[in-house]
Amino acid sequence: MYGRGIYALRDVSLVVEKGEFVFLTGPSGAGKSTLLRLLLRQELATEGSVKVAGRDLAKLTPSQAQSYRRAVGFVFQDFKLIPSKTVLDNVGIVPRVLGATSVQQQRRTFQVLKWLGLQHRMNAYPLELSGGEQQRVAIARALVNEPALILADEPTGNLDPDLSLEIMNLFRDINSRGTTVLVATHNRELMRHVGRRSITLDHGHLVEAQ
Amino acid sequence: MTAHWFTYSLQEALASLGRQRVSVMLSVLTIGAALLVLGGFLLVTVNLDRAVSTWSEAAEFSVYLNDDITPEQRVALNTLLGGHPAVASREYVSKADAGVRFKRDFPDLAAGLADMPQNPLPASIEVRLNPARADGATLEAFARRLTGTEGVADVRFDRRWLERLGQIASGVRWAGWILGAVLLIASVLTVATVVRLSLHARRDEVDIMQLMGAPIGLLRGPLVVEGILQGGAGALVALVALYVGYVLVRGRVLAVLGPAFDAASFGFLPAGLSALVVLVGMAVGCAGGYLAARHVR
Protein backbone atom coordinates (compact mmCIF):
# COMPACT_ATOMS: atom_id res chain seq x y z
CA MET A 1 0.00 0.00 0.00
CA TYR A 2 1.27 3.49 -0.82
CA GLY A 3 0.37 6.55 1.23
CA ARG A 4 -3.20 7.88 1.66
CA GLY A 5 -4.76 4.43 1.49
CA ILE A 6 -3.86 3.78 -2.15
CA TYR A 7 -3.18 0.13 -2.81
CA ALA A 8 -0.74 -0.86 -5.57
CA LEU A 9 -1.74 -4.49 -5.04
CA ARG A 10 -4.66 -5.82 -3.03
CA ASP A 11 -6.06 -9.28 -2.39
CA VAL A 12 -3.45 -10.82 -4.66
CA SER A 13 -2.84 -14.42 -3.72
CA LEU A 14 -0.92 -16.62 -6.13
CA VAL A 15 1.59 -19.42 -6.23
CA VAL A 16 4.27 -20.00 -8.85
CA GLU A 17 5.79 -23.47 -8.79
CA LYS A 18 9.49 -24.11 -9.06
CA GLY A 19 10.53 -24.45 -12.72
CA GLU A 20 7.38 -22.74 -14.04
CA PHE A 21 7.21 -20.10 -16.76
CA VAL A 22 4.54 -17.56 -15.90
CA PHE A 23 3.41 -14.39 -17.60
CA LEU A 24 2.19 -11.44 -15.57
CA THR A 25 -0.06 -9.34 -17.70
CA GLY A 26 -2.47 -6.47 -17.47
CA PRO A 27 -2.74 -2.83 -18.51
CA SER A 28 -0.32 -0.13 -17.42
CA GLY A 29 -0.72 0.60 -13.71
CA ALA A 30 -2.15 -2.88 -13.04
CA GLY A 31 0.62 -3.64 -10.51
CA LYS A 32 2.86 -5.95 -12.58
CA SER A 33 6.05 -4.03 -11.86
CA THR A 34 5.13 -3.65 -8.20
CA LEU A 35 4.73 -7.41 -7.91
CA LEU A 36 8.16 -7.92 -9.48
CA ARG A 37 9.69 -5.32 -7.16
CA LEU A 38 8.22 -7.19 -4.21
CA LEU A 39 9.74 -10.41 -5.53
CA LEU A 40 13.09 -8.70 -6.02
CA ARG A 41 12.74 -7.29 -2.50
CA GLN A 42 13.13 -3.74 -3.74
CA GLU A 43 9.96 -3.06 -1.79
CA LEU A 44 8.37 -4.80 1.17
CA ALA A 45 4.67 -5.59 1.40
CA THR A 46 2.85 -3.40 3.91
CA GLU A 47 0.28 -6.16 4.41
CA GLY A 48 0.40 -9.89 3.76
CA SER A 49 3.56 -11.71 2.82
CA VAL A 50 5.71 -12.60 -0.15
CA LYS A 51 7.41 -15.98 0.15
CA VAL A 52 10.04 -17.43 -2.15
CA ALA A 53 11.17 -21.00 -1.58
CA GLY A 54 9.27 -20.88 1.72
CA ARG A 55 11.07 -17.80 3.06
CA ASP A 56 9.19 -14.61 3.89
CA LEU A 57 11.12 -11.87 2.11
CA ALA A 58 10.12 -9.24 4.69
CA LYS A 59 11.85 -11.22 7.42
CA LEU A 60 15.23 -11.53 5.73
CA THR A 61 18.19 -9.80 7.37
CA PRO A 62 20.24 -7.49 5.12
CA SER A 63 22.83 -10.21 4.51
CA GLN A 64 20.10 -12.81 3.86
CA ALA A 65 18.51 -10.37 1.41
CA GLN A 66 21.86 -10.09 -0.41
CA SER A 67 22.12 -13.88 -0.59
CA TYR A 68 18.55 -14.08 -1.85
CA ARG A 69 19.18 -11.56 -4.61
CA ARG A 70 22.20 -13.57 -5.78
CA ALA A 71 19.77 -16.36 -6.62
CA VAL A 72 17.53 -14.05 -8.66
CA GLY A 73 18.23 -12.70 -12.13
CA PHE A 74 16.45 -9.59 -13.34
CA VAL A 75 15.81 -8.09 -16.76
CA PHE A 76 14.30 -4.66 -17.35
CA GLN A 77 12.61 -3.00 -20.29
CA ASP A 78 15.34 -0.33 -20.45
CA PHE A 79 18.12 -2.95 -20.14
CA LYS A 80 19.96 -1.04 -17.35
CA LEU A 81 23.39 -1.72 -18.80
CA ILE A 82 26.40 0.29 -17.63
CA PRO A 83 27.32 2.47 -20.63
CA SER A 84 30.97 2.89 -19.61
CA LYS A 85 31.60 -0.87 -19.53
CA THR A 86 31.97 -3.31 -22.41
CA VAL A 87 29.60 -6.23 -22.94
CA LEU A 88 32.15 -8.50 -21.28
CA ASP A 89 32.39 -6.22 -18.22
CA ASN A 90 28.63 -5.65 -18.02
CA VAL A 91 28.08 -9.38 -17.77
CA GLY A 92 31.28 -10.17 -15.88
CA ILE A 93 30.46 -7.68 -13.14
CA VAL A 94 28.16 -10.21 -11.51
CA PRO A 95 30.71 -12.98 -10.85
CA ARG A 96 33.30 -10.31 -10.17
CA VAL A 97 31.22 -8.64 -7.48
CA LEU A 98 30.30 -11.97 -5.99
CA GLY A 99 33.95 -12.90 -5.53
CA ALA A 100 34.63 -15.34 -8.39
CA THR A 101 38.24 -15.70 -9.44
CA SER A 102 39.35 -14.02 -12.64
CA VAL A 103 39.42 -17.37 -14.48
CA GLN A 104 35.94 -18.27 -13.22
CA GLN A 105 34.61 -14.85 -14.23
CA GLN A 106 35.95 -15.18 -17.77
CA ARG A 107 34.80 -18.75 -18.20
CA ARG A 108 31.27 -18.15 -16.95
CA THR A 109 30.89 -14.87 -18.80
CA PHE A 110 32.15 -16.29 -22.07
CA GLN A 111 29.93 -19.36 -21.76
CA VAL A 112 26.77 -17.34 -21.32
CA LEU A 113 27.70 -14.83 -24.03
CA LYS A 114 28.40 -17.68 -26.41
CA TRP A 115 25.07 -19.31 -25.59
CA LEU A 116 23.28 -16.04 -26.35
CA GLY A 117 25.28 -15.52 -29.55
CA LEU A 118 27.10 -12.45 -28.30
CA GLN A 119 30.67 -13.71 -28.22
CA HIS A 120 31.61 -11.58 -31.23
CA ARG A 121 30.30 -8.44 -29.46
CA MET A 122 32.19 -8.93 -26.21
CA ASN A 123 34.29 -5.79 -26.53
CA ALA A 124 31.50 -3.52 -27.74
CA TYR A 125 29.91 -0.88 -25.53
CA PRO A 126 26.13 -0.90 -24.95
CA LEU A 127 25.52 2.15 -27.11
CA GLU A 128 27.18 0.36 -30.03
CA LEU A 129 24.61 -2.45 -29.84
CA SER A 130 21.11 -2.78 -31.26
CA GLY A 131 18.15 -2.92 -28.89
CA GLY A 132 17.89 -6.68 -29.26
CA GLU A 133 21.59 -7.13 -28.56
CA GLN A 134 21.39 -4.89 -25.50
CA GLN A 135 18.50 -6.93 -24.13
CA ARG A 136 20.41 -10.15 -24.77
CA VAL A 137 23.35 -8.68 -22.82
CA ALA A 138 20.95 -7.88 -19.98
CA ILE A 139 19.68 -11.46 -20.11
CA ALA A 140 23.25 -12.74 -20.13
CA ARG A 141 23.92 -10.68 -17.01
CA ALA A 142 20.82 -12.15 -15.38
CA LEU A 143 21.90 -15.69 -16.28
CA VAL A 144 25.61 -15.61 -15.57
CA ASN A 145 25.17 -16.42 -11.91
CA GLU A 146 22.88 -19.36 -12.77
CA PRO A 147 19.91 -18.03 -10.78
CA ALA A 148 16.97 -20.19 -9.71
CA LEU A 149 14.51 -17.42 -10.60
CA ILE A 150 14.44 -14.91 -13.46
CA LEU A 151 12.24 -11.81 -13.20
CA ALA A 152 11.70 -9.82 -16.37
CA ASP A 153 9.78 -6.54 -16.44
CA GLU A 154 8.50 -5.76 -19.96
CA PRO A 155 11.69 -7.20 -21.49
CA THR A 156 10.41 -6.68 -25.03
CA GLY A 157 8.84 -3.27 -24.47
CA ASN A 158 11.53 -1.48 -26.48
CA LEU A 159 11.94 -4.12 -29.20
CA ASP A 160 10.30 -4.76 -32.57
CA PRO A 161 8.09 -7.89 -32.99
CA ASP A 162 10.81 -10.14 -34.47
CA LEU A 163 13.31 -9.28 -31.74
CA SER A 164 10.59 -9.65 -29.12
CA LEU A 165 9.91 -13.15 -30.35
CA GLU A 166 13.61 -13.95 -30.27
CA ILE A 167 13.88 -12.75 -26.66
CA MET A 168 10.82 -14.77 -25.61
CA ASN A 169 12.29 -17.87 -27.21
CA LEU A 170 15.40 -17.25 -25.15
CA PHE A 171 13.33 -17.12 -21.96
CA ARG A 172 11.68 -20.36 -22.98
CA ASP A 173 15.11 -21.97 -23.44
CA ILE A 174 16.19 -20.68 -20.07
CA ASN A 175 13.05 -22.13 -18.50
CA SER A 176 13.62 -25.48 -20.19
CA ARG A 177 16.88 -25.72 -18.23
CA GLY A 178 14.92 -25.64 -14.97
CA THR A 179 14.97 -21.95 -14.12
CA THR A 180 11.71 -20.43 -12.90
CA VAL A 181 10.79 -17.49 -15.16
CA LEU A 182 8.33 -14.71 -14.42
CA VAL A 183 7.79 -12.24 -17.26
CA ALA A 184 5.67 -9.11 -16.99
CA THR A 185 4.28 -8.06 -20.37
CA HIS A 186 1.14 -6.68 -21.92
CA ASN A 187 1.96 -8.23 -25.31
CA ARG A 188 -0.72 -10.89 -25.67
CA GLU A 189 0.62 -11.97 -29.06
CA LEU A 190 3.87 -13.03 -27.50
CA MET A 191 2.06 -14.78 -24.67
CA ARG A 192 0.04 -16.76 -27.17
CA HIS A 193 3.23 -17.65 -29.05
CA VAL A 194 4.98 -18.96 -25.95
CA GLY A 195 1.81 -20.52 -24.62
CA ARG A 196 2.41 -20.62 -20.88
CA ARG A 197 0.37 -19.85 -17.77
CA SER A 198 -0.59 -16.22 -17.36
CA ILE A 199 -1.73 -14.14 -14.40
CA THR A 200 -3.72 -11.02 -15.17
CA LEU A 201 -3.76 -8.02 -12.89
CA ASP A 202 -5.90 -4.92 -13.11
CA HIS A 203 -5.84 -1.93 -10.77
CA GLY A 204 -3.88 -3.97 -8.27
CA HIS A 205 -6.30 -6.89 -8.23
CA LEU A 206 -5.84 -10.40 -9.51
CA VAL A 207 -8.50 -10.77 -12.19
CA GLU A 208 -7.46 -13.96 -13.94
CA ALA A 209 -5.04 -16.82 -13.33
CA GLN A 210 -4.96 -19.37 -16.13
CA MET B 1 36.88 -11.62 0.81
CA THR B 2 39.11 -8.87 2.17
CA ALA B 3 41.59 -9.20 -0.71
CA HIS B 4 38.70 -9.28 -3.16
CA TRP B 5 37.16 -6.22 -1.51
CA PHE B 6 40.43 -4.33 -1.63
CA THR B 7 41.24 -5.26 -5.25
CA TYR B 8 37.76 -4.45 -6.46
CA SER B 9 37.55 -1.18 -4.51
CA LEU B 10 40.98 -0.05 -5.67
CA GLN B 11 40.28 -0.83 -9.33
CA GLU B 12 36.92 0.90 -9.27
CA ALA B 13 38.29 3.89 -7.35
CA LEU B 14 41.15 4.36 -9.82
CA ALA B 15 38.74 4.11 -12.74
CA SER B 16 36.46 6.66 -11.10
CA LEU B 17 39.34 9.06 -10.41
CA GLY B 18 40.32 8.80 -14.06
CA ARG B 19 36.77 9.63 -15.16
CA GLN B 20 36.48 12.92 -13.29
CA ARG B 21 39.94 14.38 -13.40
CA VAL B 22 39.02 18.04 -12.95
CA SER B 23 36.92 17.72 -9.81
CA VAL B 24 39.40 15.23 -8.36
CA MET B 25 42.24 17.66 -9.04
CA LEU B 26 40.36 20.42 -7.22
CA SER B 27 39.76 18.11 -4.29
CA VAL B 28 43.42 17.05 -4.18
CA LEU B 29 44.53 20.70 -4.29
CA THR B 30 42.12 21.60 -1.47
CA ILE B 31 43.52 18.85 0.73
CA GLY B 32 47.02 19.82 -0.38
CA ALA B 33 46.43 23.46 0.63
CA ALA B 34 45.08 22.46 4.04
CA LEU B 35 47.96 20.10 4.70
CA LEU B 36 50.45 22.65 3.37
CA VAL B 37 49.28 25.09 6.05
CA LEU B 38 49.38 22.38 8.71
CA GLY B 39 52.75 21.13 7.47
CA GLY B 40 54.09 24.68 7.34
CA PHE B 41 53.21 25.23 10.98
CA LEU B 42 54.73 21.85 11.81
CA LEU B 43 57.93 22.76 9.98
CA VAL B 44 58.23 26.07 11.83
CA THR B 45 57.54 24.56 15.25
CA VAL B 46 59.79 21.56 14.65
CA ASN B 47 62.67 23.88 13.81
CA LEU B 48 61.88 26.19 16.72
CA ASP B 49 61.87 23.17 19.02
CA ARG B 50 65.17 22.03 17.57
CA ALA B 51 66.67 25.48 18.06
CA VAL B 52 65.39 25.75 21.61
CA SER B 53 66.74 22.28 22.35
CA THR B 54 70.13 23.06 20.85
CA TRP B 55 70.37 26.39 22.62
CA SER B 56 69.17 24.86 25.88
CA GLU B 57 72.03 22.39 25.78
CA ALA B 58 74.42 25.27 25.28
CA ALA B 59 72.69 27.49 27.84
CA GLU B 60 74.95 29.75 29.76
CA PHE B 61 75.13 32.76 31.99
CA SER B 62 76.88 35.81 30.69
CA VAL B 63 78.02 37.74 33.76
CA TYR B 64 78.85 41.31 32.66
CA LEU B 65 81.36 43.08 34.83
CA ASN B 66 81.57 46.71 35.83
CA ASP B 67 84.53 48.46 34.24
CA ASP B 68 85.68 49.43 37.74
CA ILE B 69 85.47 45.96 39.30
CA THR B 70 88.16 45.50 41.91
CA PRO B 71 90.50 42.47 42.12
CA GLU B 72 88.87 41.49 45.44
CA GLN B 73 85.41 41.59 43.91
CA ARG B 74 86.63 39.48 40.98
CA VAL B 75 88.12 36.88 43.35
CA ALA B 76 84.87 36.75 45.29
CA LEU B 77 82.89 36.32 42.07
CA ASN B 78 85.17 33.51 40.87
CA THR B 79 84.85 31.78 44.21
CA LEU B 80 81.09 32.00 44.00
CA LEU B 81 81.05 30.58 40.46
CA GLY B 82 83.60 27.87 41.17
CA GLY B 83 81.66 26.60 44.15
CA HIS B 84 78.33 26.09 42.38
CA PRO B 85 77.64 22.51 41.17
CA ALA B 86 75.76 23.67 38.01
CA VAL B 87 78.81 25.52 36.67
CA ALA B 88 80.57 23.24 34.17
CA SER B 89 83.21 25.75 33.07
CA ARG B 90 83.79 29.48 32.79
CA GLU B 91 85.74 31.75 30.52
CA TYR B 92 86.80 35.34 31.07
CA VAL B 93 86.14 37.61 28.06
CA SER B 94 87.98 40.90 28.30
CA LYS B 95 86.69 44.18 26.83
CA ALA B 96 89.17 43.76 23.98
CA ASP B 97 88.03 40.16 23.31
CA ALA B 98 84.41 41.33 23.35
CA GLY B 99 85.30 43.93 20.71
CA VAL B 100 86.95 41.31 18.51
CA ARG B 101 83.93 39.01 18.78
CA PHE B 102 81.56 41.84 17.97
CA LYS B 103 83.50 42.74 14.83
CA ARG B 104 83.55 39.06 13.79
CA ASP B 105 79.85 38.43 14.37
CA PHE B 106 78.56 41.77 13.10
CA PRO B 107 80.99 42.95 10.41
CA ASP B 108 78.49 45.52 9.12
CA LEU B 109 78.54 47.31 12.46
CA ALA B 110 82.26 46.99 13.06
CA ALA B 111 83.04 50.42 11.61
CA GLY B 112 80.69 52.08 14.11
CA LEU B 113 82.51 50.46 17.01
CA ALA B 114 85.87 51.58 15.65
CA ASP B 115 84.66 55.19 15.48
CA MET B 116 83.88 55.29 19.19
CA PRO B 117 86.48 56.97 21.44
CA GLN B 118 86.60 53.97 23.69
CA ASN B 119 85.34 50.37 23.63
CA PRO B 120 81.81 50.42 25.16
CA LEU B 121 81.57 46.63 25.48
CA PRO B 122 81.92 45.30 29.02
CA ALA B 123 84.20 42.48 30.09
CA SER B 124 82.31 39.36 31.03
CA ILE B 125 82.55 35.84 32.37
CA GLU B 126 80.78 33.29 30.20
CA VAL B 127 79.55 30.47 32.37
CA ARG B 128 78.79 27.14 30.70
CA LEU B 129 76.16 25.28 32.67
CA ASN B 130 75.60 21.65 33.32
CA PRO B 131 71.78 21.47 33.19
CA ALA B 132 71.79 17.98 34.68
CA ARG B 133 73.19 19.36 37.93
CA ALA B 134 70.52 21.96 38.64
CA ASP B 135 66.90 22.62 37.82
CA GLY B 136 65.50 25.82 36.36
CA ALA B 137 64.45 27.29 39.72
CA THR B 138 67.92 26.75 41.23
CA LEU B 139 69.55 28.38 38.22
CA GLU B 140 67.11 31.30 38.43
CA ALA B 141 68.02 31.81 42.09
CA PHE B 142 71.72 31.58 41.23
CA ALA B 143 71.27 34.17 38.45
CA ARG B 144 69.57 36.55 40.93
CA ARG B 145 72.37 36.03 43.43
CA LEU B 146 74.99 36.80 40.78
CA THR B 147 73.09 39.93 39.77
CA GLY B 148 73.38 41.22 43.33
CA THR B 149 77.07 40.47 43.64
CA GLU B 150 79.41 43.49 43.85
CA GLY B 151 81.29 44.25 40.61
CA VAL B 152 78.58 42.64 38.44
CA ALA B 153 76.78 45.01 36.03
CA ASP B 154 74.26 42.53 34.65
CA VAL B 155 73.58 38.84 34.19
CA ARG B 156 72.11 37.44 31.01
CA PHE B 157 70.56 34.04 31.50
CA ASP B 158 69.83 32.35 28.16
CA ARG B 159 67.16 30.10 29.60
CA ARG B 160 64.76 32.98 30.23
CA TRP B 161 64.43 33.92 26.58
CA LEU B 162 64.61 30.28 25.56
CA GLU B 163 61.53 29.70 27.69
CA ARG B 164 59.83 32.63 26.00
CA LEU B 165 60.85 31.19 22.63
CA GLY B 166 59.44 27.83 23.70
CA GLN B 167 56.16 29.53 24.63
CA ILE B 168 56.07 31.21 21.23
CA ALA B 169 56.69 27.83 19.55
CA SER B 170 53.85 26.36 21.57
CA GLY B 171 51.56 29.23 20.54
CA VAL B 172 52.51 28.80 16.89
CA ARG B 173 51.85 25.06 17.21
CA TRP B 174 48.37 25.61 18.68
CA ALA B 175 47.53 28.19 16.04
CA GLY B 176 48.62 25.64 13.44
CA TRP B 177 46.49 22.89 14.96
CA ILE B 178 43.39 25.12 15.09
CA LEU B 179 43.80 26.55 11.58
CA GLY B 180 44.76 23.13 10.25
CA ALA B 181 41.73 21.51 11.87
CA VAL B 182 39.38 24.05 10.28
CA LEU B 183 40.98 23.55 6.88
CA LEU B 184 40.93 19.77 7.27
CA ILE B 185 37.21 19.82 8.08
CA ALA B 186 36.71 21.85 4.90
CA SER B 187 38.78 19.25 3.06
CA VAL B 188 36.65 16.40 4.40
CA LEU B 189 33.55 18.14 3.06
CA THR B 190 35.24 18.78 -0.30
CA VAL B 191 36.23 15.14 -0.64
CA ALA B 192 32.73 14.07 0.36
CA THR B 193 31.25 16.31 -2.34
CA VAL B 194 33.60 15.04 -5.04
CA VAL B 195 33.03 11.41 -4.05
CA ARG B 196 29.28 12.02 -4.08
CA LEU B 197 29.65 13.29 -7.64
CA SER B 198 31.41 10.03 -8.37
CA LEU B 199 28.59 8.12 -6.69
CA HIS B 200 26.09 10.06 -8.78
CA ALA B 201 27.98 9.13 -11.94
CA ARG B 202 27.95 5.47 -10.87
CA ARG B 203 24.38 5.46 -9.54
CA ASP B 204 23.07 3.02 -12.16
CA GLU B 205 25.98 0.70 -11.57
CA VAL B 206 25.47 0.81 -7.81
CA ASP B 207 21.72 0.18 -8.21
CA ILE B 208 22.41 -2.83 -10.42
CA MET B 209 25.00 -4.16 -8.01
CA GLN B 210 22.49 -3.81 -5.17
CA LEU B 211 19.96 -5.80 -7.18
CA MET B 212 22.45 -8.55 -7.85
CA GLY B 213 23.10 -8.86 -4.11
CA ALA B 214 26.49 -7.19 -3.82
CA PRO B 215 27.57 -6.80 -0.18
CA ILE B 216 27.21 -3.25 1.15
CA GLY B 217 30.96 -3.16 1.79
CA LEU B 218 31.60 -3.72 -1.88
CA LEU B 219 29.26 -0.88 -2.81
CA ARG B 220 30.80 1.56 -0.35
CA GLY B 221 34.40 0.34 -0.66
CA PRO B 222 35.30 2.08 -3.93
CA LEU B 223 33.96 5.39 -2.59
CA VAL B 224 35.99 5.19 0.62
CA VAL B 225 39.12 4.09 -1.26
CA GLU B 226 38.58 6.94 -3.72
CA GLY B 227 38.57 9.37 -0.79
CA ILE B 228 41.70 7.79 0.67
CA LEU B 229 43.51 8.09 -2.66
CA GLN B 230 42.49 11.73 -2.99
CA GLY B 231 43.67 12.44 0.55
CA GLY B 232 46.99 10.65 0.03
CA ALA B 233 47.59 12.50 -3.24
CA GLY B 234 46.74 15.82 -1.54
CA ALA B 235 49.22 15.06 1.23
CA LEU B 236 51.97 14.27 -1.28
CA VAL B 237 51.24 17.52 -3.11
CA ALA B 238 51.49 19.36 0.22
CA LEU B 239 54.80 17.69 1.12
CA VAL B 240 56.33 18.48 -2.28
CA ALA B 241 55.17 22.12 -2.07
CA LEU B 242 56.44 22.35 1.50
CA TYR B 243 59.83 20.95 0.53
CA VAL B 244 60.15 23.38 -2.37
CA GLY B 245 59.23 26.22 -0.01
CA TYR B 246 61.71 24.95 2.57
CA VAL B 247 64.55 24.84 0.02
CA LEU B 248 63.72 28.35 -1.17
CA VAL B 249 63.48 29.82 2.34
CA ARG B 250 66.29 27.92 4.02
CA GLY B 251 69.12 30.06 2.62
CA ARG B 252 67.39 33.29 3.58
CA VAL B 253 66.61 32.14 7.12
CA LEU B 254 70.18 31.08 7.71
CA ALA B 255 71.46 34.37 6.26
CA VAL B 256 69.30 36.33 8.72
CA LEU B 257 69.85 34.17 11.80
CA GLY B 258 73.47 33.61 10.83
CA PRO B 259 75.77 32.78 13.70
CA ALA B 260 72.92 32.32 16.17
CA PHE B 261 71.60 29.31 14.29
CA ASP B 262 73.30 26.04 13.58
CA ALA B 263 72.63 25.27 9.90
CA ALA B 264 72.69 21.55 10.59
CA SER B 265 69.80 21.83 13.04
CA PHE B 266 67.57 23.63 10.51
CA GLY B 267 65.95 20.87 8.52
CA PHE B 268 62.83 19.56 6.82
CA LEU B 269 60.15 17.56 8.58
CA PRO B 270 61.52 14.26 9.90
CA ALA B 271 60.40 11.09 8.07
CA GLY B 272 57.98 10.22 10.87
CA LEU B 273 56.19 13.57 10.70
CA SER B 274 56.13 13.47 6.89
CA ALA B 275 54.49 10.04 7.09
CA LEU B 276 52.05 11.49 9.64
CA VAL B 277 51.09 14.24 7.17
CA VAL B 278 50.37 11.57 4.54
CA LEU B 279 48.36 9.52 7.04
CA VAL B 280 46.36 12.60 8.07
CA GLY B 281 45.65 13.26 4.39
CA MET B 282 44.47 9.70 3.88
CA ALA B 283 42.36 9.87 7.05
CA VAL B 284 40.76 13.10 5.81
CA GLY B 285 40.04 11.42 2.46
CA CYS B 286 38.70 8.33 4.20
CA ALA B 287 36.33 10.45 6.30
CA GLY B 288 35.12 12.33 3.21
CA GLY B 289 34.69 9.09 1.28
CA TYR B 290 32.79 7.51 4.13
CA LEU B 291 30.47 10.53 4.42
CA ALA B 292 29.61 10.09 0.75
CA ALA B 293 29.41 6.29 0.98
CA ARG B 294 26.79 6.50 3.74
CA HIS B 295 24.31 7.49 1.05
CA VAL B 296 24.55 3.93 -0.30
CA ARG B 297 22.18 1.84 1.80
Image (tube, coloured by chain):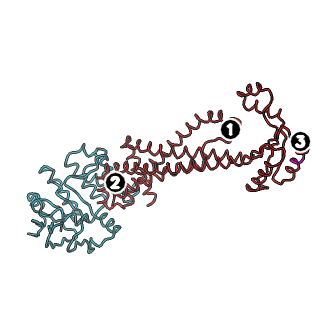
Q: Which color is chain B depicted in?
A: red
Residue at position x 20%, y 71% in the image: A17
Residue B27 percent across, percent down from the top left: 41, 45
Residue A147 percent across, percent down from the top left: 28, 63
Q: Can you say which quadrant of the picture contains the N terminus of chain A?
A: bottom left
A190 or B153: nearer the viewer: B153
Which quadrant of the structure image shows residue A205? bottom left
Mark 1 falls within which chain?
Answer: B
Residue stretch in magenta:
B74-78
Left or right, A91 with respect to B69, comes to left
C-alpha distance separating marks 2 and 3: 96 Å
**Can residue B8 be seen here?**
no
Residue at position x 42%, y 57% in the image: B5
Which secondary structure dominates the residues rendered in magenta?
A: helix
A168 or B256: nearer the viewer: B256
Mark 3 surroundings within 10 Å by alpha-carbon count, few (fewer than 14), some (14 through 19), many (20 or more): few
Q: Amino acid at mark 3?
A: Thr
Residue that numbered label 3 is attached to: B70
Left or right, B23 with respect to A148, comes to right
Residue that numbered label 2 is attached to: A93
| Chain that appears cyan | A
**Is residue B77 rendered magenta in the image?**
yes
C-alpha distance separating marks 1 and 3: 41 Å
Mark 2 falls within which chain?
Answer: A
Q: Amino acid at mark 1?
A: Ala
Q: Can you say which quadrant of the picture contains the C terminus of chain A?
A: bottom left
Which quadrant of the structure image shows residue A194? bottom left
Left or right, B71 with respect to A139, comes to right
Q: Are marks 1 and 2 on the same chain?
A: no
